[in-house]
Amino acid sequence: MQLTLWTYEGPPHVGAMRIAASMRGVHYVLHAPQGDTYADLLFTMIERRGQRPPVTYTTFQARDLGGDTAELVKRHVREAVDRFRPDALLVGESCTAELIQDQPGALAQGMELTMPVVSLELPAYSKKENWGAAETFYQLVRNLLKEQAPANSQHDPRAWQHQGRRPRVNLLGPSLLGFRCRDDVLEVQKLLTLHGIDVGVVAPLGAGVEDLQRIPDADLNICLYPEVAESSCSWLERNFGMPFSRTVPIGVGATHDFLVEVHEMLGMEPPAPDEGYRRSRLPWYSESVDSTYLTGKRVFIFGDGSHALAAARICSEELGFTVVGLGTYSREMARPVRAAAKALGLEALISDDYLAVEAAMAEAAPELVLGTQMERHSAKRLGIPCAVISTPMHVQDVPARMSPQMGWEGANVIFDDWVHPLMMGLEEHLIGMFRHDFEFVDGHQSHLGHAGGAGAADSSGLSDIPEEGDDALQWTADGEAELKKIPFFVRGKVRRNTEAYARDVGCREISSETLYDAKAHFKA
């Protein structure tokens, strides 16, 4: 176990809470000590929901450990059933309660309750939040559908053709505290409807127990978020013969591939290859002269597996960026991320240590970072533009407006969210390039008069101020002037390299000549 300020994923019981809170008629009894109720804040603060998650905590205290904590579990289970009357009951324990080994799930299953009881065994010291969400959803699906599994698991996804109806699919994987899941679902539903495909069940987000029981009525399953739904989709394929899609429709190319895959599985005519050009602005912009400024821009990508993979494809194939770093904290998706990185000539970064990610980011010296809320903080410290593409996220990444990542409209949102930080960075770069022109000399004022201008405090060069101290290196005026000619997004690295070179050769004063010598040294 490692103490840290930030974490990419919570413990697995938080993943179970996500599934319970996403569904209707499902209640979660969590055996946990007093203090483990902090996860409630994630839903009220980050998701900005008007209701707390459907969770009953046993909230045992230190003095309870000397008594019968198993009886405490059973009492809370009875109270939760009597009060909430759920259609299905989840029972599990937090990471701290796991040490007591009360086995609350087994206790609840022995109480002869009238509703389905799903016992959750979530190893908190070896697994994390996304795995916990996937395991909880899988156990729910399995427990509710195992009696329906046919002896012969033959399933024809083209049966709709002779049943006189439209094809029907399920959307599996969206949940609360996922990245833009609500908006993605609406966008994918609209996309499929335009192609004559109905959506049967969306789960777990917004689904009830009766909805999960209707899953086998569809022709195929669409695995929107593999981190949450892939294990359930695989079980449904093995036991019901239901095929499922493998393409996540994030980006123009992936959305087209997704539609082709779904159409082929359903036995439908494939969509027109130019549909993306007609419905998204990203392809047009990528081929326009305005996009040439973005060509070759160095991008560092880190996030959950699905969004990191999608971002790598969009950057390299659709926007013309150069991917200089690719990684994920999702160890369950390490293999496809490593394969994608290898195809780009990179070594994937698989880590849940945000400091290691920040170090890799600084080493790669990108011009844009696509990451999580943590990478936004790190990029701010490094002076690099950043767009958030994945959980963990802050409240500002859960907009009240519609802002999907999937489908044609999702490609438009991505186009805005990723390109705008670079264009704003261009303005800063231009100011840096022309700071010595007459408009920027001391005493000059803009049309806003005393509201701004060069006379105001210049915060853009704060990172270039040398450190004070007896052993501090001194930059000469011509050295500082030469340093400021270097683009802002690599200036910090050049300063560090030059100062390291100066210390190695015993030089206390850094001039423009020293900077040139350091440049030649590091290129050698």
Image (cartoon, rainbow, N blue to C red):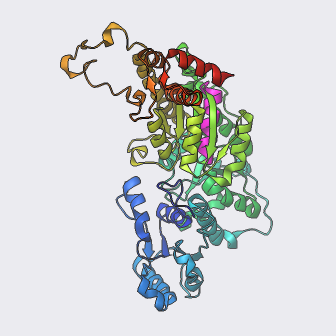
Q: Nearer the viewer, residue 441 or 220?
A: 441
Q: Quadrant of the N terminus?
A: bottom right
Residue drawn where x is 68% and y is 44% of the image: 337
Q: Residue furthest bottom?
A: 67
Left or right: where 436 falls relative to 89 = left
Magenta segment's dominant SS is helix
Q: Nearer the viewer, residue 267 or 177?
A: 177
Asked if residue 194 shows in the view, the reply is no
Q: Quadrant of the C terminus?
A: top right
Q: Is residue 86 above or below residue 183?
A: below
Q: Is residue 315 magenta?
A: yes
Q: Nearer the viewer, residue 280 or 405?
A: 405
Image quarter for residue 452? top left
Q: Is residue 471 magenta?
A: no
Q: Is residue 359 above or below residue 416?
A: below
x then y, percent, for residue 402? 43, 41
x then y, percent, for residue 491? 50, 25
Left or right: where 214 falls relative to 495 = right
Q: Magenta residues?
A: 305-321
Residue drawn where x is 34% and y is 28% of the image: 459
